[in-house]
């Protein structure tokens, strides 16, 4: 067994022993909405309960010990309400006014109701899972049991459990991911500051939980940032509790030791979540400042050199550490093109060889020439997008990740993907048939599902911090053959119409913050715009998978992201894109 694996295993064992963290997947928008609704119901019940008992207080004659217990729990109820009011005030204060494109209507109102961020999601989940769980066990008599019963009835009325340990862990991991990818400042996030939004302070236990999530994912430098921030939050919360402080000291020491060990064994280059100097020698705050200054210098130098000098040239179909670093920079809006390279890209009007687009040609934007990555703007109307969302909502399930070794979709692997997915056949609704016709017109390819020329439309919903790690869309049907190995006959039989030759992805809404689609090996990022679509080829003309088309969905910082994919099969496109280019 390698030494690195031994250290990673030791970290995982110690973290689970100390925290009991549950490893889970994403939290759907419906889960978030249910949690927020239940939180509101709880607060209303608590307000009514406290108001009633304050009026009765002068009539009650109790023993001193019973009175002290009642006052203690009532103060906890008041703090629960106060935090809710502060959270609500921050939410209204940070809400943007109106959509970016100036459109209105019912769909935009739905999106505003859904909009939240990972900090708020973590706060609401913690309130339900930890705070309310403790409060409902309060020994406050029959009147309190009426409150508990009322909340339980509201939870049933909301259609399921609103708040669970799994959902709390999901939001913790979402905040960890957002912090890592966007290089945000952990102390600011601990105070609830996400960019320009108002404060929603986290507790020391919340902050430490995010650090634990970073430890579990091998981001030891990021974990040290969170544990340092947890120390500060713990000091601000009041009288120091030695047990809590001791746990934080142990976790910070564990993160520091794991970071320094990995640095000594594997070096600094292309290691996510690792700093160039040992944390035991140079504090994390000092290294953070130097790392940001170095990144600014590298960004300026890279723009002068152009894209090709810094991009990965590997032939691997899996993401490399270098791909991960470029992915993170692209998510933050950096560019990997020089001004000369960008000047060659054009926006144009094109009927794409389709008679259907003669009177209303497609609006095409080029993001890359080789390999070609194109955006088509205003291809679906707001009404069509609303219909597709409406059809997909009741069918949404936790997304699964394709296993390229088996060609099958297995159990959900939310470490890599945290969206919710629904599959819609074109025959189910006229709007879906219209969307398929649009795909055929702008791509020039055959996309009939009945003839197996394309897969059903896949609709994806990304909520708080949801993402999809760098991956390929092609199924690697013939990857073993290209590597001079025996082909996977079972995999080939499962896909009689060949691999996914191309992808067209519709953006179904504007995302408030985050959610770009990025291509780390091309150096390109695409902003989600309502009604637009992005297109790329997954296979080279020879039929081999194009490893340059590694792509990813950046985490959603605020709001919700809806996309829908159309994957097009290769064999039926023989006359539209011949296997070998014409000489």
Image (cartoon, helix red, strand yellow):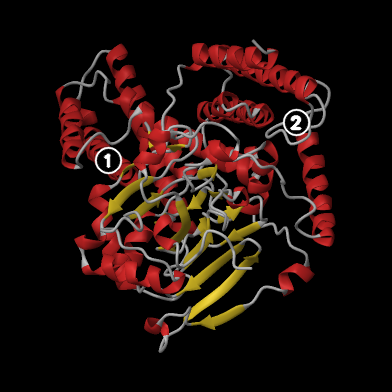
Q: Is residue 569 visible?
A: no
Question: Alpha-carbon neighbours of circle 1 within 10 Å: few (<14), some, or many (≥20)?
Answer: many
Q: Quadrant of residue 398?
A: top left
Q: Depth check: give the residue in front, 317 or 229.
A: 317
Q: From the viewer's perspective, is 98 left or right of 187?
A: left
Whole-percent x, y for residue 260 in the image:
76, 21
Q: Are marks 1 and 2 in contact (CB under 8 Å)?
A: no
Q: Depth check: give the residue in front, 409 or 82.
A: 409
Whole-percent x, y for residue 44 in the image:
25, 43
Q: From the viewer's perspective, is 517 left or right of 414?
A: right
- The CA span between labels 1 and 2 is 39 Å
> Pointer 1: what residue?
38
Which label number is shown at residue 232?
A: none
Residue located 57% across and 81% down the image: 348
Picture layout, residue 287 above or below residue 193: above
Q: Quadrant of residue 304?
A: bottom right
């Amino acid at each position: 067994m390698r030494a690195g694996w031994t250290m990673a295993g030791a970290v995982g064992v110690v973290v689970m022993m100390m925290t009991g963290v549950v490893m889970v997947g994403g939290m759907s928008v419906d889960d978030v909405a249910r949690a927020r609704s239940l939180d509101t119901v709880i607060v209303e019940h608590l307000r009514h309960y406290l108001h009633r008992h304050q009026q009765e207080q002068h009539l009650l004659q109790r023993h001193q010990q019973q009175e002290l217990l009642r006052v203690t729990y009532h103060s906890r109820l008041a703090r629960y309400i106060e935090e809710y009011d502060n959270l609500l005030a921050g939410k209204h204060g940070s809400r943007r006014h109106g959509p970016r494109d100036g459109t209105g209507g019912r769909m935009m109102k739905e999106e505003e109701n859904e909009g939240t961020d990972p900090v708020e999601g973590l706060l609401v989940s913690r309130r339900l899972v930890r705070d309310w769980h403790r409060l409902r066990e309060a020994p406050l008599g029959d009147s309190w049991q009426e409150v508990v019963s009322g909340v339980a009835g509201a939870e049933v009325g909301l259609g399921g459990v609103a708040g669970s340990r799994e959902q709390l862990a999901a939001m913790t991991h979402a905040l960890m991911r957002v912090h890592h990818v966007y290089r945000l400042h952990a102390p600011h996030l601990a105070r609830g500051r996400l960019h320009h939004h108002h404060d929603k302070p986290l507790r020391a236990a919340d902050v430490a939980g995010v650090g634990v999530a970073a430890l579990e994912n091998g981001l030891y430098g990021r974990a040290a940032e969170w544990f340092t921030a947890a120390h500060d939050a713990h000091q601000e919360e009041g009288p120091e509790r030695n047990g809590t402080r001791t746990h934080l000291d142990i976790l910070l020491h564990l993160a520091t030791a794991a970071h320094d060990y990995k640095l000594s064994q594997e070096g600094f280059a292309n290691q996510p979540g690792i700093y160039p100097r040992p944390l035991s020698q140079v504090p994390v705050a000092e290294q953070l400042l130097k790392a940001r200054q170095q990144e600014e210098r590298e960004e300026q130098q890279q723009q002068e050199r152009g894209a090709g000098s810094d991009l990965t040239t590997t032939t691997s179909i899996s993401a490399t550490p270098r791909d991960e670093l470029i992915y993170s920079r692209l998510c933050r809006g950096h560019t990997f093109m020089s001004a000369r390279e960008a000047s060659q890209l054009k926006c144009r009007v094109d009927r794409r060889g389709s008679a259907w687009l003669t009177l209303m040609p497609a609006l095409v934007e080029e993001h890359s020439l080789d390999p070609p990555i194109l955006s088509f703007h205003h291809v679906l109307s707001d009404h069509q997008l609303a219909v597709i969302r409406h059809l997909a909502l009741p069918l949404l399930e936790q997304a699964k990740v394709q296993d390229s070794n088996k060609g099958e979709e297995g159990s959900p692997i939310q470490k890599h993907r945290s969206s919710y997915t629904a599959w819609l056949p074109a025959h189910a609704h006229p709007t879906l048939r219209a969307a398929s016709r649009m795909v055929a017109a702008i791509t020039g390819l055959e996309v009939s599902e009945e003839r197996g020329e394309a897969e059903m439309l896949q609709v994806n919903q990304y909520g708080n911090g949801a993402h999809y790690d760098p991956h390929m869309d092609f199924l690697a049907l013939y990857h073993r053959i290209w590597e001079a190995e025996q082909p996977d006959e079972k995999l080939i039989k499962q896909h009689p119409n060949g691999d996914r030759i191309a992808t067209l992805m519709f953006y179904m809404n504007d995302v408030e913050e985050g959610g770009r689609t990025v291509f780390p090996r091309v150096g390109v990022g695409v902003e989600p715009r309502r009604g637009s679509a992005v297109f790329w080829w997954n296979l080279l003309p020879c039929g081999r998978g194009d490893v340059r088309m590694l792509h990813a969905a950046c985490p959603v910082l605020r709001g919700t992201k809806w996309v829908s994919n159309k994957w097009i099969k290769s064999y039926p496109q023989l006359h539209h894109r011949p296997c070998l280019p014409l000489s």
